[in-house]
Amino acid sequence: MDTLYLIVAVIAVLLVLSAFFSGSETAVTAASRPRLHQLEKDGNKRAHIVNRLRNRPERLIGSLLVGNNIVNILASALATSVLIALFGDAGVAYSTVAMTLLVIVFSEVLPKTYAIRNPDKLALAVAPLVRIVVAVLTPLTIAIDAVVCGLLALGGKRGTGGGGEAREEELRGAIDLHAVTDDESAHEGHMLRSILDLAEVEVGEVLTHRTDVQTIDAALPPREILRRVLDSPYSRLPLYRDESDNIIGVIHAKALYRALDAAGGDIDKIDVAAAANAPWFIPEQTGLLAQLGAFRRRHEHFAIVVEEYGAVMGIVTLEDIVEEIVGQIHDEHDVPVAGARAQGDGSWIVTGTATIRDLNRELGWNLPDEEATTIAGLVLHAARVIPDEGQSFVFHDYRFDVLRRRANQIRTLRVTPPGGGAARTGAA
């Protein structure tokens, strides 16, 4: 009888060890990587252990699985021997039912459920013991891993790591999960996704088009130039000579005031071209992340964007890039949505040069921006014709009414999003 009690006690200990292996596996793999990384930076030794263990996931998982299977098989074998001694051949069935229930409830579901609910806490608690288990079982794990790799090689399979792309997808997924909790989290999620997208967005997609850029003719009298600078809501304005594509400098309001002070207050003595900064030209294909770094290195906030043939496309500023991350930054000179006015019937009057990215961001639309940068460009791309005034189209469930056209350029449209205005289908 004493032997029976001893075996039952050993089985109970083995079940506890099985629960330890199961819970540890779930906790260490599910623990928050960013939080443990920060804890390690703060000097937490257990977080350091967990991070080191996760750097070799194949050895970690292999050791825990080996240990878990050893104790489960041993516990089942002991239980079967005891029950056969007590009940004969029927003990096999009794042992199978009893051990299945005990292992599933107390060694699998219970510890894994607790680990899922408290992954960081449990991972830090079991880290020292798990390190010992991995160290002891690593030789056996390496041997098993060699056998597995050999079998996979025979089948023509090779392991491939996800690399940076997989990590970025994981990060985007984590951001999306975080962003669904409330409005503030949604805004934070939008900013984080925008940071990840910076390298994929080109300055040509966020620039201020040349038709909307205020420029100044350098041939104008200094007094007229000063008046235009004072009347402008912007602190920096491009200077051109002879033709608008010939940008010779960028005049800053403060530089003009300093030149006026140096001239003793005599406006007519100011050399505006000399007071202007040299223009900085960049190609429209430049990525926003690269341009942001260039702005920081050059300590500048303003660049002239040119296309492949050297023609000026527009300008891009540091604020344009920052707005791609944080959203529209409004000041006393801005309108709530640049280039768009809400109408009572749910439609919007939109200028043709309004960018699709801004409209999607500010109005919650989902118009595609892969083939066109502006709303007019989207209509031209989808319609495959230059539409006349009064012509209407329906693309991507949005209705586009051309209100005004100058030469071949669409100047103003009425855009009715799905559910806004009268329901209409088809295209005119």
Image (spheres, grey):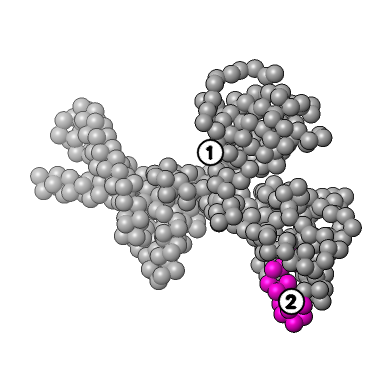
Disc 2 secondary structure class = helix
Q: Earlier in the sequence, mark 1 or mark 2?
A: 2
Picture residue at 68% right of the left edge, 23% below the top? 392
Quadrant, the C terminus = top right
In the foreground, 34 or 45: 34
**What is the residue that sits farthest to the left in this orientation?**
1
Q: Which residue is mark 1?
A: 364
Of helix, strand and loop, which one carries label 1?
loop
Question: Looking at the image, which is closer to me, 390 or 16?
Answer: 390
Q: Residue furthest right?
A: 242
Residue 406 image point, x, y percent: 78, 35
- Magenta part of the chain: 250-266
Q: Which three-letter amino acid code belongs to the residue tagged 2? A: Leu
Q: Which residue is mark 2?
A: 260
On the question of residue 290 being in view, the answer is no
Q: Position of residue 66 (x, y in %)?
A: 40, 48
Residue 109 picture quarter: top left
Based on the picture, tell me whether residue 263 belongs to the magenta stretch.
yes
Crowd rating for badge 2 (residues with CA inside 10 Å; few <14, some 14–19, many 20+): many
369 left or right, relative to 41: right
Residue at image location 68% in from the left, 59% down from the top: 232
Which picture quadrant has residue 133? bottom left
